[in-house]
Image (spheres, helix red, strand yellow):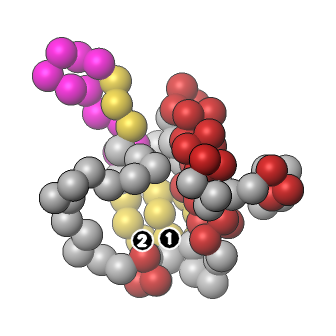
Amino acid sequence: MDIDIHTETRKDKDGKLMSNIVPTLELGDMVTVPASDVSNIVTEYGMVNLKGKSTWQRAKLLISLAHPDFRDELEAAALKANIITRGTIGLS
């Protein structure tokens, strides 16, 4: 079983708390592991298994691992990008 362990938050140079779980990548960001190869993710907020999950399920599970201060913002971004829809908000 592969498990990726990450600290979910970091502080920028000004000391502002930032989330490592983000809704989109910035221009020039590198992805070295395809999403389909990632199964278990662990942060200080829990562990999820993404194997076999749909895109909206993966998004909701990753949002559940985010710092509570960032969850609403991440959910709003996922809604705006049509990754999750209003009909899937209460589903897991």
For image coordinates 85% across by 56% down, the residue present is 87
Residue 56: numbered disc: none
**What's under tag 2, amino acid-wise?**
Ile
Q: Quadrant of residue 47?
A: bottom right
Figure check: 68 above or below 63 = above
Q: Is residue 43 visible?
A: no
Q: CA distance from mark 1 to mark 2?
A: 5 Å
| 86 displayed left or right of 24 | right
Magenta residues, dominant SS class:
loop
Marks 1 and 2, the one that precedes in the sequence: 2
How many labels, in total?
A: 2
- The residue under the point 26% across, 51% down is 26
Hey, what amino acid is under mark 1?
Asn
* Mark 1 Cα shell of 10 Å, populated few (<14), some (14-19), many (≥20): some
Indicate whether residue 13 is drawn in magenta.
yes
Query: Label 1's element?
Result: strand
**Left or right of residue 72: residue 7:** left
- Residue annotated with mark 2: 3
Quarter of the C terminus within the rendering: bottom right
From which residue to which does the magenta span run?
Answer: 7-16
Image coordinates for residue 43, horizontal then vertical, percent: 45, 50
From this view, report whether residue 85 is shown above or below residue 69.
below
Question: In terms of depth relative to the viewer, which is nearer, 6 or 61?
Answer: 61
The answer to whether residue 44 is left or right of residue 20 is: right
Left or right of 18 on screen, residue 29: left
At label 2, counting other C-alpha atoms closer than 10 Å, the crowd grade (few under 14, some 14-19, many 20 or more) is few
Q: Position of residue 7 (x, y in %)?
A: 35, 45
Q: Position of residue 65 (x, y in %)?
A: 55, 48
**Mark 2 and mark 1 in contact (Cβ < 8 Å)?**
yes
Residue in view at x 54 percent, y 26 percent: 69
**Observer-nearest of 25 and 64:** 25
Q: Which residue is mark 1?
A: 40
